[in-house]
Image: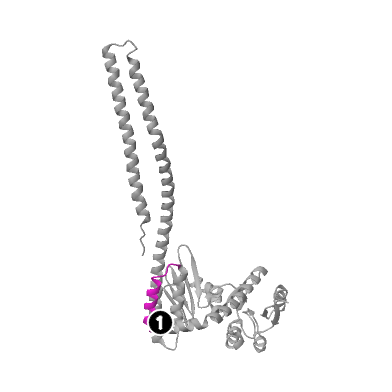
């Protein structure tokens, strides 16, 4: 029998509790609770929690905070359920420790999609965590020993070598972790957007908060949390050491330098990608032009001699015919001069065609050299 994940439903409204149970019971083991205190007093281990916000005894926010304090609730995804979809409510949900948000009335497909994604992400994070713990411990211990400024210098050095948006985002996450900071980063390039936290893809709640606060200003602080925004980069910090104001000030400055440097590198990377795309387009056009030139040269090489021979033969035939037409000496001399003039003009024409082909080949050669030049930042 395949494993079925366990889901807790905490909802004080009996009809709503029954609807959620009916929607999910075929795919999950469901245990429902009519209040936050009853849920917190239980000893069940769950893979996800659906948590109503507006409950009389204990609100969903406080229930989530206390659940996070329990050993069993440290990494269990919590999806808040509310009839109101406002920025303050989403920010409060995130601040309370939520991972995602559902708006009542709940659409069945959205519920299954978000719940399935939350559980899948948690399983992937657990797998990755077990595989990379030792490697991360060595890497980040080395970075931490360099000190706060050393982290900035290390980021500047390694981000200069980054050639993808993902690499820049990963460097930012590594720098934040070296300072002992938890959070997420979002980098926005012209061709791709990347959003990461220390475990992998950022959570839906982190993404929602960054999206809401992206245009709020350069630096926005909210207790132990902060958001730093630039055109191409946003940093979300979740655990500023508010008990040490001096350290918070230093970290704020370092994070701003980090974000601004990443923003400049993102702009440079966008330009490099655009140049590569332009170069590919030019090279494709040159390939077509090269084929057309080769065809034209082949045609010229085979047809021009034949045309010259035909013209000469026709003119010579005309010259021989003039003496049989009973023309006067003056008329014959006039026709001979005309024939010589036609011959000279024909030769000039063929010479001009050959020179034009040579000039065109020189221009094409210069275009090829320009297309092959590689200018990198």
Q: Is residue 78 left or right of residue 294?
A: right
Residue in the picture at 38% in, 75% down: 257
Quadrant that contains the C terminus: bottom left
Residue situated in front as seen by the camera: 107 or 374: 374
What are the residue bounds of the magenta stretch?
Answer: 146-164
How far across and down, in percent of the image, does residue 3 sit?
A: 69, 78
Circle 1: element type? helix
Q: Residues within 10 Å of mark 1 (few under 14, many from 20)?
A: some
Q: Main secondary structure of the magenta part?
A: helix
Corner quadrant of residue 301: top left
- To which residue does mark 1 refer? 251
The image's colour scheme reads one colour
Q: Is residue 96 visible?
A: no
Residue situated in front as seen by the camera: 224 or 267: 267
Q: Is residue 334 left or right of residue 249?
A: left
Does the magenta-highlighted stretch encompass residue 154? yes
Does the magenta-highlighted stretch encompass residue 334? no
Residue in the picture at 34% in, 22% down: 316
How far across and down, in percent of the image, does residue 299 sit?
A: 42, 37
Quadrant that contains the N terminus: bottom right
How far across and down, in percent of the image, does residue 259 sit?
A: 41, 73
Residue situated in front as seen by the camera: 135 or 13: 135
Corner quadrant of residue 248: bottom left
How far across and down, in percent of the image, does residue 172 sit?
A: 44, 75
Query: Residue 372, relative to residue 344: is it above or below?
Result: below
């Amino acid at each position: 029998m395949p494993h079925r994940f366990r889901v807790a439903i905490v909802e004080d409204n009996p009809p709503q509790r029954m609807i959620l149970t009916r929607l999910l019971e075929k795919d999950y083991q469901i245990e429902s609770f009519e209040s936050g205190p009853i849920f917190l007093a239980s000893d069940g281990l769950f893979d996800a929690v659906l948590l109503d916000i507006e409950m009389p005894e204990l609100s969903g926010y406080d229930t989530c905070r206390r659940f996070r304090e329990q050993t069993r609730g440290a990494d269990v995804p919590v999806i808040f359920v509310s009839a109101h979809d406002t920025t303050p409510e989403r920010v409060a949900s995130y601040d309370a420790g939520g991972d995602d948000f559902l708006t009542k009335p709940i659409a069945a497909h959205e519920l299954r999609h978000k719940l399935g994604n939350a559980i899948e992400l948690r399983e992937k994070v657990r797998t990755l965590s077990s595989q990379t713990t030792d490697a991360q411990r060595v890497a980040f211990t080395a970075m931490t020993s360099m000190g706060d400024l050393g982290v900035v210098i290390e980021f500047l050095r390694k981000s200069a070598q980054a050639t993808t948006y993902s690499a820049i985002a990963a460097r930012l996450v590594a720098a934040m972790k070296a300072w002992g900071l938890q959070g997420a980063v979002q980098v926005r390039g012209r061709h791709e957007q990347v959003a990461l936290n220390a475990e992998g893809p950022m959570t839906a709640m982190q993404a929602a908060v960054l999206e809401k606060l992206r245009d709020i200003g350069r630096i926005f602080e909210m207790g132990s949390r902060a958001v730093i925004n630039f055109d191409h980069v946003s940093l979300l910090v979740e655990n500023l050491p508010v008990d040490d104001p001096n350290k918070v000030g230093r970290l704020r400055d370092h994070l701003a330098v980090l974000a601004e440097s990443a923003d400049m590198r993102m702009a440079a990377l966008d330009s490099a990608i655009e140049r590569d795309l332009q170069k590919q387009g030019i090279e494709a056009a040159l390939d077509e032009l090269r084929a057309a030139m080769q065809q034209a040269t082949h045609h010229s090489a085979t047809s021009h001699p034949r045309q010259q021979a035909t013209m000469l033969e026709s003119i010579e035939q005309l010259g021989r015919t003039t003496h049989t037409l009973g023309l006067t000496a003056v008329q014959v001399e006039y026709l001979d001069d005309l024939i010589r003039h036609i011959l000279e003009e024909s030769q000039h024409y063929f010479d001009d065609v050959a020179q034009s082909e040579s000039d065109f080949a020189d221009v094409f050669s210069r275009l090829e050299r320009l297309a092959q030049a590689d200018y990198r930042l």
